Image (cartoon, helix red, strand yellow):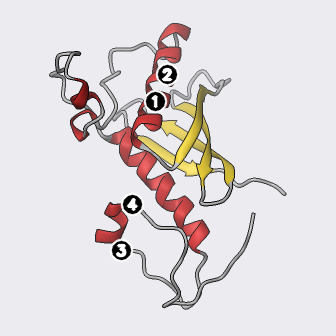
Amino acid sequence: MFTTVIKPGDIPELRGSLFDVLVDDEVKSHYYDPYEHYKKMVCRDIEALLNTKLDWNRFDGSLNELKVSSVNYGLADFSTKNLTYPGDKDILCYEIRDLIEQFEPRLEKVKVRILDNSDPIDRVVRLMITANLILEEEKERLSFQTKLNPVDHLFSVKELEHEG
């Protein structure tokens, strides 16, 4: 992990998504770390991707261009799935992994797993998403703690800090 500090006016090597360029609502302090800001943008974009729900109308599978277009941006409805059943847990993990690999080009080698919950009263589904963040000259392994609220089916995503 590196801690380069950039002064305002310097051109950071890491660029945000088009969305970030258009609506950069974060007020930058006199000094900020573009690398940490970049990771926060990725985390925010994963959360937005998971919380975007697909329309129930599906397109013909022969329309290959639509498979990778913004029409398919978002997660399919899984509210009818039983996430206490291992088969449905696996399906959710595969769908999230495929979705991130398709729509988040800054990440590669994505892995998703559901964490065990020993509290029978707690119905929150916790997932661990790990992936390589692609930087210009190197890659860093990131982990995101993801929680799925069982009531509104919304995800919250936060990056876990790595030691060392």
- Which dot, 1 or 4, sits closer to the camera? 4
Q: Which mark is residue 83?
A: none
> Disc 2 marks which residue?
94
Instruction: Tell me the distance, in whole angstroms, between the alpha carbons under discs 3 and 1.
Output: 27 Å
In this rendered view, identify the residue nearer to me: 148 or 48.
48
Please tell me which of labels 1 and 4 falls first in the chain.
4
Is residue 131 positioned above or below 125 on the image? below
Question: Which residue bears the numbered disc 1?
Answer: 96
Is disc 3 surrounded by few (<14), some (14 to 19) or many (20+) residues within 10 Å? few
Q: Secondary structure at mark 2?
A: helix
- How busy is the neighbourhood of tag 2: few (under 14 within 10 Å), some, or many (20 plus)? some
Residue 25's label in the rendered image is 3
Name the residue tied to disc 4.
17
3D distance between C-alphas at marks 3 and 2: 33 Å
Mark with earlier residue (3, 4): 4
What residue is rendered at 51% in x and 50% in y? 106
